[in-house]
Amino acid sequence: MAGTVAPGARPGPVPALSAARTGDYYGDATERVMSSLANLLCLFCISTSAPPNAPLAREAGDIWYREEMLSGGQHLLRLSTSDRILDSDSWRRQRLEAFAENYAASACGGRYTMLRGFRLTSYAGQAVFRCR
Protein backbone atom coordinates (compact mmCIF):
# COMPACT_ATOMS: atom_id res chain seq x y z
CA MET A 1 0.00 0.00 0.00
CA ALA A 2 1.53 3.20 -1.16
CA GLY A 3 1.30 6.25 1.08
CA THR A 4 0.52 4.37 4.30
CA VAL A 5 2.52 4.61 7.50
CA ALA A 6 3.43 1.57 9.52
CA PRO A 7 1.56 1.25 12.83
CA GLY A 8 3.36 3.13 15.63
CA ALA A 9 5.56 5.13 13.25
CA ARG A 10 5.37 8.88 13.05
CA PRO A 11 5.15 10.51 9.65
CA GLY A 12 7.90 13.05 9.04
CA PRO A 13 10.00 14.66 6.40
CA VAL A 14 12.37 12.72 4.23
CA PRO A 15 15.91 13.06 5.60
CA ALA A 16 17.70 15.99 4.03
CA LEU A 17 20.92 15.46 2.15
CA SER A 18 22.33 18.87 3.01
CA ALA A 19 24.61 19.33 5.99
CA ALA A 20 22.57 22.33 7.10
CA ARG A 21 19.73 20.22 8.46
CA THR A 22 20.04 18.17 11.60
CA GLY A 23 17.77 15.89 13.53
CA ASP A 24 16.76 12.30 13.24
CA TYR A 25 14.47 10.79 10.65
CA TYR A 26 11.30 11.38 12.60
CA GLY A 27 12.41 14.19 14.90
CA ASP A 28 12.27 17.89 14.39
CA ALA A 29 14.68 19.14 11.79
CA THR A 30 16.46 22.38 12.69
CA GLU A 31 18.70 24.43 10.48
CA ARG A 32 22.06 25.63 11.64
CA VAL A 33 22.84 29.08 10.46
CA MET A 34 26.34 30.48 10.85
CA SER A 35 26.33 33.85 12.54
CA SER A 36 27.70 36.87 10.72
CA LEU A 37 30.55 37.12 13.24
CA ALA A 38 31.59 33.56 12.50
CA ASN A 39 31.42 34.30 8.77
CA LEU A 40 33.73 37.29 9.22
CA LEU A 41 36.17 35.28 11.32
CA CYS A 42 36.18 32.51 8.75
CA LEU A 43 36.87 35.01 5.96
CA PHE A 44 39.63 36.64 8.04
CA CYS A 45 41.30 33.27 8.71
CA ILE A 46 41.24 32.32 5.04
CA SER A 47 42.66 35.65 3.89
CA THR A 48 45.51 35.72 6.44
CA SER A 49 46.56 32.11 6.14
CA ALA A 50 48.39 32.67 2.85
CA PRO A 51 52.17 32.61 3.17
CA PRO A 52 54.01 35.89 2.70
CA ASN A 53 55.43 36.60 -0.71
CA ALA A 54 59.19 36.24 -0.76
CA PRO A 55 61.09 38.84 -2.74
CA LEU A 56 62.16 37.58 -6.13
CA ALA A 57 65.82 37.13 -6.94
CA ARG A 58 67.36 39.59 -9.38
CA GLU A 59 70.16 38.94 -11.82
CA ALA A 60 73.38 40.90 -12.25
CA GLY A 61 75.68 39.17 -14.72
CA ASP A 62 76.19 35.61 -13.56
CA ILE A 63 75.12 36.41 -9.96
CA TRP A 64 71.58 36.12 -8.67
CA TYR A 65 70.83 38.12 -5.51
CA ARG A 66 68.02 38.96 -3.12
CA GLU A 67 68.07 41.57 -0.36
CA GLU A 68 66.00 41.27 2.82
CA MET A 69 65.71 43.78 5.65
CA LEU A 70 66.50 42.50 9.14
CA SER A 71 65.97 44.18 12.49
CA GLY A 72 68.29 46.93 13.63
CA GLY A 73 68.81 48.33 10.13
CA GLN A 74 70.67 45.25 8.96
CA HIS A 75 70.45 43.99 5.39
CA LEU A 76 70.72 40.32 4.45
CA LEU A 77 72.04 39.74 0.95
CA ARG A 78 71.54 36.24 -0.45
CA LEU A 79 73.79 35.41 -3.38
CA SER A 80 74.21 32.58 -5.85
CA THR A 81 76.31 32.16 -8.96
CA SER A 82 76.66 29.75 -11.82
CA ASP A 83 79.64 27.86 -13.14
CA ARG A 84 81.81 29.27 -15.89
CA ILE A 85 83.86 27.29 -18.37
CA LEU A 86 87.13 28.18 -16.68
CA ASP A 87 86.11 28.54 -13.06
CA SER A 88 87.24 27.45 -9.63
CA ASP A 89 85.83 27.53 -6.13
CA SER A 90 88.11 30.40 -5.08
CA TRP A 91 87.11 32.51 -8.13
CA ARG A 92 83.41 32.01 -7.35
CA ARG A 93 84.03 33.00 -3.70
CA GLN A 94 85.89 36.13 -4.82
CA ARG A 95 83.05 37.08 -7.23
CA LEU A 96 80.43 36.64 -4.50
CA GLU A 97 82.45 38.67 -1.96
CA ALA A 98 83.19 41.45 -4.47
CA PHE A 99 79.52 41.63 -5.45
CA ALA A 100 78.44 41.84 -1.78
CA GLU A 101 80.94 44.66 -1.12
CA ASN A 102 79.86 46.60 -4.22
CA TYR A 103 76.17 46.11 -3.46
CA ALA A 104 76.56 47.32 0.13
CA ALA A 105 78.55 50.34 -1.03
CA SER A 106 75.91 51.33 -3.59
CA ALA A 107 72.98 50.65 -1.23
CA CYS A 108 74.52 52.70 1.60
CA GLY A 109 76.15 55.48 -0.40
CA GLY A 110 79.64 54.17 0.37
CA ARG A 111 79.17 54.12 4.16
CA TYR A 112 78.53 50.58 5.40
CA THR A 113 79.83 47.94 7.77
CA MET A 114 80.01 44.32 6.66
CA LEU A 115 78.85 42.34 9.72
CA ARG A 116 78.92 38.72 8.60
CA GLY A 117 79.48 36.64 5.53
CA PHE A 118 78.45 33.01 5.21
CA ARG A 119 79.49 30.59 2.53
CA LEU A 120 76.62 28.13 2.15
CA THR A 121 77.98 26.14 -0.79
CA SER A 122 80.61 26.74 -3.44
CA TYR A 123 77.84 28.39 -5.53
CA ALA A 124 75.92 30.36 -2.84
CA GLY A 125 76.56 32.68 0.06
CA GLN A 126 75.01 35.28 2.35
CA ALA A 127 76.26 38.62 3.62
CA VAL A 128 74.88 40.82 6.39
CA PHE A 129 75.69 44.55 6.34
CA ARG A 130 74.50 47.75 7.98
CA CYS A 131 74.55 51.27 6.60
CA ARG A 132 76.32 53.92 8.73
Image (spheres, rainbow, N blue to C red):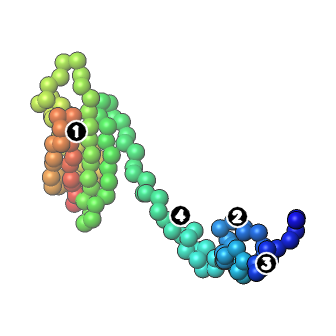
Q: Earlier in the sequence, mark 2 or mark 1?
A: 2
Residue tagged by mark 1?
Answer: 124
Closer to us: mark 3 or mark 4? 3
Nearest the viewer among 30 and 104 is 30
Residue type at tag 3: Pro
Q: Are marks 4 and 2 in contact (CB under 8 Å)?
A: no
Q: Is 115 left, or right, of 73 in this rendering?
A: left
Which residue is identified by label 4? 47
- The amino acid beneath tag 2 is Leu
To which quarter of the image does residue 14 belong?
bottom right
First in sequence: mark 4 vs mark 2: 2
Q: Secondary structure at mark 1?
A: strand
How many C-alpha atoms fall within 10 Å of the one at disc 3: few (<14), some, or many (≥20)? few
Give the distance between the C-alpha atoms of the residues marked 3 and 4, in whole angstroms.
54 Å
Do tag 2 and tag 1 residues touch (Cβ < 8 Å)? no
Which label sits in the foreground, 1 or 3?
A: 3
User: Is residue 2 rendered to the left or right of residue 56?
Assistant: right
**Whether residue 105 is visible:** no
Q: Secondary structure at mark 2?
A: loop
Q: Amino acid at mark 1?
A: Ala
